[in-house]
Amino acid sequence: MPSDLLPFADVPVWAVICVFVAHFIGFFIRGAFGFGSNMPIVLLTTWLLGPHHAILLVIFTATVAQVHLFPQGFRTADWTVTRPLILGMFVGVAVGTWLFTILAADWLTLLMGILITVVVAMDRLRLLERLTQYVDIRARAVTSTLAAISGGVGTVSGGGGIYFLVIYLKLACKTAASLRGTNLILAGFFILVRVALLVPTGLITAPLLIEAALLSPVVLLGTWAGTRAFHVTEPRRFYDALQLLLLLAALALMFRGIAKVF
């Protein structure tokens, strides 16, 4: 193979194996919860590939996963919740792409980690459920605003925007299946918009696409295994696991932000 097409050039074999394992773990999470693969993969593979390589690679492997998962999302998503979120998220991603050029993403990453921790604590103490007595959380203004914030923060900080929405979606979606389906649609839309915005940048290379193709079987295996895990899990355990995932994500974001800022 010509050297300019060689995948994982200058990356040791052991590191490539770790990249494959990280992608399986990340897409198992996406298969189970409908979102959440990008950030853990980036956190693990940045040390092996460098940040730009890791982020660009996971965007394209996530695109592969969404082709597999999108039909499930269409069947089970709560479209009353999903439609206004898509519009708000589009605005947020567009604004976030612009802000990425003028703001430090590290501070926003740290802030997002703190926000997610607070929101998870509020959910655990059932404060959000009490809030629904006074605010219609399914109102278009509420959903569009939250989606715009999520899309903007997630784009600027390099990922994790969906984490900011999940506790809200847990209250807005009536079942675990509709929550997962809505997550699938929103995460897929977020990824596809980011890919579209990357096309004119010149950052998409042949080796990157070959690497994503090589990882595709692992991606599909991970999403399949995660989907199976979801279907055999009781709703209560699903929500408990979701809270744990959010808490770990928040801690990882805060650690990443603190390490970068200080």
Image (cartoon, helix red, strand yellow):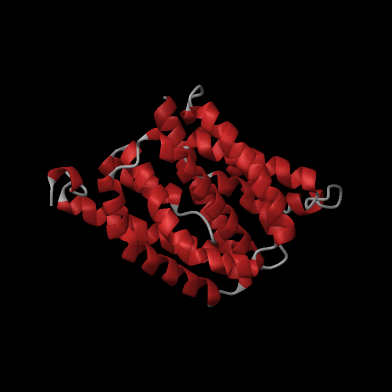
Residue beneath the point at 77% across and 54% down = 129
Residue beneath the point at 67% across and 43% down = 88
Residue beneath the point at 65% across and 45% down = 119
Residue 1 on image: x %, y %:
13, 52
Image quadrant in which the C terminus is located: top left
Left or right of 217 in this view: 152: right
Q: Is residue 118 visible?
A: no
Q: Pick whichever, 48 or 205, lies toward us.
A: 205
Residue 260 on image: x %, y %:
40, 29
Count all numbered tags in the image, as a single digit: 0
Residue 190 on image: x %, y %:
54, 48
Image-quadrant location for residue 61: bottom left
Left or right of 213 in this view: 94: right
Position of residue 170 relative to residue 86, above or below, is below
Residue beneath the point at 22% across and 53% down = 16
Residue furthest top in the image:
102
Position of residue 26 relative to residue 134, above or below, is below
Residue 112 on image: x %, y %:
56, 37
Q: Pick whichever, 134 or 63, lies toward us.
A: 63
Residue furthest bottom in the image:
232
Left or right of 126 in this view: 242: left
Residue furthest right in the image:
134
Left or right of 17 in this view: 105: right
